[in-house]
Amino acid sequence: MSTQVQHAEPGFFHKYLWSTDHKMIAMQYMFTGMAMALIGGFFAYVFRMQQGFPNQNVPGFGLVTPGKYNAVVTMHGSIMIFWVAMPILIAAFGNFLIPLMIGCDDMAFPRINRLSYQIFLLSALVLLSSFLVKGGPFGGAWTAYPPLSASGAYNLTPAGAVLWLIAVALEFVAFLMGGINFTVTTMNSRAPGMKMYDIPLVVWMIVLASIIFMCSAGPLIAGAVMLLFDQTMSTGFYDPTRGGDPLLWQHLFWFFGHPEVYVVLLPAMGIVAEVVAVFARKKVFGYKTVLYTTWAVGFLSFVVWAHHQFVAGIDPRMANIFSITTLMISVPITEMVFLYIATLYGGSITLDTPMLWALGFIAEFLIGGVTGIFLGSSGTDIYLHDTYFVIAHFHYTFVPIAIISVFAGITFWYPKMFGRMLNETLGKIHFWGTVIPFNVIFIPLFITGTAGDQRRVYSYAQFAEQSRPALQHLRTTSTIALLFMLSFQLVFLFNFFWSLRNGKTAGPNPWRSSTLEWTVPSPPPHGNFAELPTVYRGPYEYGLPGAAQDFAPQNLPDSALAEGMKA
Amino acid sequence: MTTEAEAHIHHPNYVKIWAILVALLIVSVLGSMSHVREVVLIAAFGVALVKAYLVAKNFMHINVEKRWVPYLLIVCLLFIVILFAGVSPDVMRHSGLHWINPSVSQPSASAADAGPK
Amino acid sequence: MSAAVKPIANTRSATGIPTARLITWWVIASEIVIFGGLLATYIMHRLGHPEWADAASHTNTWAGAFNTLVLLTSSLCAVMAHKAADAHDGPKAAKLLRLTALGGLLFLTIKGFEWTKDIHEGFVLSSGGFWSFYYVLAGLHGLHVLAGMIIMLVVASDAAKNQELQRVECIGLYWHFVDIVWIFLFPLLYIAK
């Protein structure tokens, strides 16, 4: 069956700005996410400079006042999660990969797809507009606890608070739409012969992430409507003097917030699975186990949320329960990491840049996961909550998710997206220049956090009891490491844009991978497949004895394999 | 476009179902006027559950749909039950063994008495 | 809208459920957690604040009951439209869909009168716990009724030309869901006050 391309060559507007082609929409999400990453990264620079060199003028920003510190910290967190991690990991990779990997010509609903990006773009613009209003952007932390977030008199950013909330709400709508589109497409539009267990893991992961997002976002959407009314219409949903309860927001927020971290983790693990299989030339160890474990994680993620609230005054019996469930959830995740390591064992490993990133993910995420145990256990959390230990823990999970695995995915699929190869040397420089400084940023923060440094304090000079003054050298070290890490991103940006025009031309399958996206030209044409494929096997058939080549593409019948036909 | 299975979907007498729903509505309104608490609750929520079931079964044809569809919807409901179970000990209760929430006993009725705005 | 070329992706059905209906079920699932979250929140507040019964006694049970009747009847029209679409009678399905939408309009109109009276009596969004929830719950539901009406009219205009008849069932499913939400809102806000 061939696809019908019925339209004439589209003009600039239709090709780049009004496209329904999933690949173009993926690019829109990716570049928007990358642009927002620059902004989020800049804010990290600002507040780390304040921490490393307190109360001095920050070059390129100025003096960091308490209000500005709060705003910058809030924006960094919000932007990195909602406008960098989610759009790149889920929307960009999901949009680009899903139709290609399941062997169809586009998403099931291309116009809903386009609309989802437009709403997402609007949400980003609303957020950015909050930088320009009186009072500046919202400064109540990405967690937006009321009464701080509900009352302009408390947060001093009344307009910013409302705009932030609307931006987040719009982002949710965009991802609900996009996620449901991904789910329906993956369920229904698969190539003939592609059964459930033949679907590449990254596709499964993105779909499961979308489902988890959908189920967890609902109560928060309700809560956000209530907060919006508290902010603007004098209601008292979260005001205890008016019959409301601030704890309600915390619960609604974290009921979403905890599944959310798995929403971003799952696509990251999916990308790592793809890269590891290809660069170890080995089937993913225990595909079904990985899948069932992911379902278990997805469900468990809904019953752990209050570990973010151990010191908030929740019912202590609940703290018991949530401690137990939180420690339980570490088991399936660890199991998945072990399965990836088992995939590596005995493989023919080549250390190309994507593989370096994938291995980096496994190593760094392990540290993040292990340090989470101290926070999941309510006893130790009472001490560690709101210290820099928490920040170091979640950056050891989030940076692998939002940065390391993203680079793994970009360096891996760049040839397919743009028809060019990235420069390997620059790629390796970028890798080491990111990962080593990353550790130097956050290991000191584990130490300062355990020593007692409190979060979200703009300057310890004014609040000496919130820190351990003798450790200033650690804070400064952390800041300098960040400066290094940010500088090395220039290597990536140069490599990315320079290679668009000057990189070595890429063929359809430079990495010799067996999944369907590598059977089409690089970049794929509109409609993807000149002839829609049929699938004959699973996605990771590497190292088959007796075959002509060391991998078996999903779309080649067994007879073609024996003859050694190329894809 | 309908698959073959749906072309043979059995369309019951929808007007009859509607009549039953309206009758149940009347029951619930009449029940609401009772002074017995249990009667009111059953009239309200018992009837609601039955009506919802009738709409789901007869109007939405959920029972001839693929089985995972009602399972998915039930799982979503289950998440809401989990939400309720986890949140209500904090939000619903206003006093415990060692604490009371004082603002509950003196709630401000309107915006004017609320905290800073 | 119906003239756009559909991708092959839209026409496949590995699950056996047509994509239009499949996406409708997922939309309904997502709405269950949105309304469910809001309703669960309301219920735990209402149970914890027995003194809200006084405020709640002012909701107009007859308006609520009549609106329930209106929505039930419009659901009947929606499912009859589905039956007509199954019989490939597009114009009849369109007529029934438009009747359904009319029911939605009637629902919103009655609610408009009901709320006008409430506001005149001084019960507004910020009038206290019960009323805040009341307006948010009924308001969110009303927005969904409005959105459903608009989509329904679009589907009807295609159906009248015997096009995209599969969408008749789908918008019907959404409408029935909105009806079921009201089936629970009615006792919560008007009966078991």
Image (spheres, coloured by chain):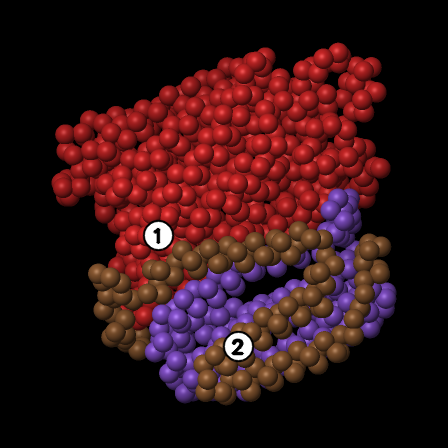
- The image position of residue A94, as x and y in percent, is 60, 39
- The image position of residue A82, as x and y in percent, is 46, 45
Nearest the camera: A411 or A56? A411
Nearest the camera: A55 or A358? A358
Label 2 in the same subunit as label 1: no
The amino acid at mark 1 is Met
Residue that carries the numbered disc 2 in the rendered image: B42
Q: For residue A313, what is the image quadrant? A: bottom left
Mark 2 secondary-structure assignment: helix
Confirm whether residue A173 shows in the render: no
Nearest the camera: C69 or C51? C51
At 31% from the left and 77% from the top, the residue drawn is B110
- Name the chain letter of the residue that bears numbered label 1: A
Q: CA distance from mark 2 to mark 1?
A: 31 Å
The amino acid at mark 2 is Ile
Confirm whether residue C86 shows in the render: yes
Q: Color of chain A here? A: red
Q: For residue A325, what is the image quadrant? A: top left
* Vertical order, A225 against A566 (above or below): below
- Name the chain letter of the residue that bears numbered label 2: B
Mark 1 secondary-structure assignment: helix
At 73% from the left and 39% from the top, the residue drawn is A190
Chain in purple in the render: C
Horizontally, residue C146 falls left or right of residue A353, namely: right
Horizontally, residue A239 falls left or right of residue A254, namely: left
Say few, some or many: other residues with alpha carbon within 10 Å of mark 1 (under 14 / 14 to 19 / 20 or more): some
- Quarter containing the C terminus of chain A: top right
- The image position of residue A474, as x and y in percent, is 23, 27
Say few, some or many: other residues with alpha carbon within 10 Å of mark 2 (under 14 / 14 to 19 / 20 or more): some
